[in-house]
Image (spheres, grey):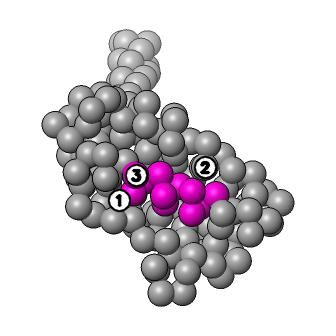
């Protein structure tokens, strides 16, 4: 009887930890539409520009990585959309990823003039994509003091 209770107790403890482990491994779903995701990008982009202007490498890197991670999620999710002529991943790889890599590289060496230049290229490419897809929102360059 004692062995039966010990075995049963160990079984339930194992089940409990198994369930805890499974719940911590579940992914978070992105249920936002493309426009909502782009609003998130605007916040990351704007804060990145502000931190670059201030010369705050650590904070700029944090916003850059958040933006890039979110862009990768968007690239994976939006292979089709009424506003897109091609999967977003192609736009990311061609127009956004090179500038993001340049910003990352420049921040690693605290080269803010290069980081700001790459940020401006990123901003230009975002606005070019918006123009190509008839999106009225314009991405501001917040490395400038007035955002223009």
Q: Residues within 10 Å of mark 1 (few under 14, many from 20)?
A: some
Residue sitting at x 33%, y 65%:
138
* Residue nearest the viewer, comparing 25 with 13: 25
* Residue nearest the viewer, comparing 9 with 69: 69
Determine the CA span between mark 2 and mark 3.
Answer: 14 Å
Residue 131 versus residue 42 in the image, above or below: above
Residue sitting at x 75%, y 58%:
106
The region drawn magenta spans: 118-128
- Residue 40 - label: 1
Contact between labelled residues 2 and 1, with CB atoms less than 8 Å apart: no
Let me know if residue 125 is in the magenta part. yes
| Residue that lies at the very extreme toward the right in this rendered image | 109
- Residue 99 - label: 2
Contact between labelled residues 3 and 2, with CB atoms less than 8 Å apart: no
Q: Residues within 10 Å of mark 2 (few under 14, many from 20)?
A: many
Let me know if residue 97 is in the magenta part. no
Q: Secondary structure at mark 2?
A: helix
x, y percentage for residue 117? 66, 63
């Amino acid at each position: 009887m004692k062995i039966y209770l010990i075995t049963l107790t160990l079984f339930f403890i194992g089940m409990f930890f198994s369930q805890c482990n499974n719940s911590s491994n579940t992914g978070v779903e992105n249920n936002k539409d493309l426009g909502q995701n782009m609003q998130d990008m605007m916040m990351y982009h704007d804060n990145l520009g502000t931190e670059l202007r201030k010369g705050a490498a650590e904070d700029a890197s944090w916003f850059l990585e958040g933006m890039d991670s979110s862009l990768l999620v968007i690239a994976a999710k939006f292979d089709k959309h009424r506003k897109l002529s091609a999967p977003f991943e192609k736009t990311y790889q061609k127009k956004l990823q090179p500038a993001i890599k340049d910003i990352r590289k420049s921040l690693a060496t605290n080269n803010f003039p290069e980081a700001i230049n790459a940020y401006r290229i990123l901003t230009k490419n975002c606005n070019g994509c918006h123009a190509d897809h008839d999106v009225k929102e314009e991405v501001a360059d917040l490395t400038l003091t007035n955002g223009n």
